[in-house]
Image: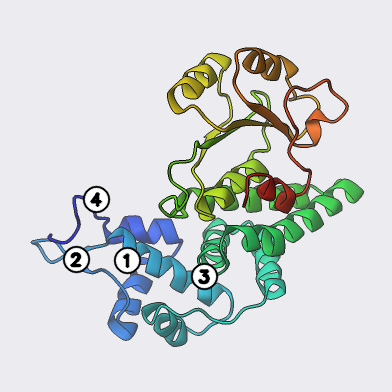
Amino acid sequence: MSGTSGARLLGSSEVARTLGISQVTLRTWEQRYGIGASERAENGRRRYTTADVERLRRMRALQAQGTGAREAASLVLSRSAAATTARQRGERLALAAEQLDLPVLGGLIDDALGSLGVVETWTEVLSPVLRAIGDRWARRGDRNAMAAEWALATAASAAIDRYPAPAPARSGRAPVLFVCAPAERHELPIKVLSSALSDDGAPSMYLGGLVTLDVLRVMAARFTPADVVVWSMTSQSADVRILRTLGAEGVPVRPAGPGWRGLPTVGEPLPPSFTGALAAFGG
């Protein structure tokens, strides 16, 4: 099994589960369209590399957008992308979210990230759909809308985790650390901002939620960040003590998110808009 550089190879059953398709479909795609596993075990069984899975995920995403199987395979293998407007992408995302179809959502978001990058995927595709679903939930108390919002946010978060960050073009600069306030549950906007900064070539690290003050101290001492951005979506999660403590210890903290509004914060708040926040870091 050469050419894998030590990476774990996946069997067809695991790949099928990951993509939400059958093993029969996997075999059909390989036999008919030449898109499939690039490795074989000694017993002849198919073994899929990470690159194989990404090609298949893109194939799945293009089919979810209405592209025929043969054309989708051709597009993937030629590394070209189907011309799809942001509105069309949003419509397909909204439909998949309503159907709670996580594999299709993942494929659609992977395709958008690969074609558009993080900033445009967020501002032109994901945010409008999330806002529309959220507005419906707020107006009607629709539990279906709540579930659709959860599905889309969950799929988007996982897609950001899969999205390969380029090597920092602005290496040598101190990184920006992004963290959620300990009680904050809505991580997606700040996670996407961190990914967008990385996509722009700047050093950035997303630490997640449930990060204690002591861990933040250790991270700040280890990486000497340009900023530690603390995100709060709601006032219930905003903990001014974190900002004050880190600020008093010389850590450059910045509050971000509507949860800090009206509170006596420490540090210069990030601009409220996504593009404004990104520009604040020179992005």
Q: Which circle's residue, 4 or 3, is located before the other in the chain?
A: 4
In whole angstroms, how far apart are the C-alphas of marks 2 and 4?
11 Å
Q: Which mark identifies residue 61?
A: 3
**Horizontal and vertical percent for residue 120?**
64, 63
17 to the left or right of 132: left
Amino acid type, mark 4: Arg
**Horizontal and vertical percent for residue 125?**
68, 64
**Horizontal and vertical percent for residue 16?**
38, 61
Q: Circle 4 sits on which residue?
A: 8
Q: Which circle's residue, 4 or 1, is located before the other in the chain?
A: 4
Image quadrant occupied by the N terminus: bottom left
Q: Which mark identifies residue 52?
A: 1
Q: Which mark identifies residue 220?
A: none
Q: Residues within 10 Å of mark 2 (few under 14, many from 20)?
A: some
**Secondary structure beneath label 3:** helix
Q: Which circle's residue, 2 or 1, is located before the other in the chain?
A: 2
Amino acid type, mark 1: Asp
Question: Eyeballing the image, is 272 above or below 119?
Answer: above
Q: Residue at x 44, y 61 (%)?
A: 19
In whole angstroms, how far apart are the C-alphas of marks 4 and 1?
12 Å
Question: Eyeballing the image, is 102 above or below 116?
Answer: above
Q: Circle 2 sits on which residue?
A: 39
